[in-house]
Image (tube, grey):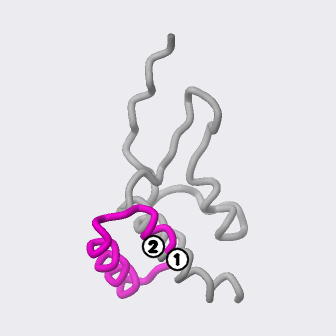
Amino acid sequence: MSKPREKSPSRAGSLPLVGGALALDFCNTSSGRGTEGCLENLNTANDLLTWARHAGVLDESRETRLLDLCGKALGSFVVMLLAVFYFWKPRIRQ
C-alpha cells in the first residue's frame, strides 16, 4: 500500500499561465490527475483568490468583495469558486 502524498505548499500565485485561455489555465492548476503524484494547487478559498489575482481575473477591490462574501458563507470554497466564475464572465466574452 502506498503512502499518501504529503501536501506541498500551493503554487497558486506562481503557476505558469500557458494555456492561452483562462479556462485552460484554471485546468492547469492541478497536475498528475489519477496518479499518486497528483498535485492540486487550489485547496482553499485563499488559494483560489491568489490564483485569480495571479491570472489577472481579479483586482484588489473584487478580491476584497469576494473575501467578504466568503466570510459570510462560512468560508465555503464552493461559494468562492462560483463567485470567481461570476466575475470571470465579463472577461471571457472579451
Residue visible at 58% across and 80% down in the picture:
88
Instruction: Give the spatial CA distance, label 2 vs label 1.
Output: 5 Å
75 w.r.t. 29: above or below: below
Q: Judge left or right: residue 73 versus residue 47.
A: left
Residue 59: within the magenta? yes
Neighbour class for label 2 at 10 Å: few (<14), some, many (≥20)?
Answer: some
Residue visible at 27% across and 72% down in the picture:
71
Q: Most extreme residue toward the top, as rendered?
A: 1
Q: Most extreme residue toward the front, as rendered?
A: 73
The residue pinned by badge 1 equals: 56
The residue pinned by badge 2 equals: 53
Range of the magenta residues?
56-82
Residue 61, image x, y percentages: 36, 87
User: Considering the image in quadrants, where does the C terminus appear?
Assistant: bottom right
Q: Judge left or right: residue 38 versus residue 53.
A: right
| Residue kind at label 2, given as amino acid type | Arg
Residue visible at 41% across and 68% down in the picture:
49
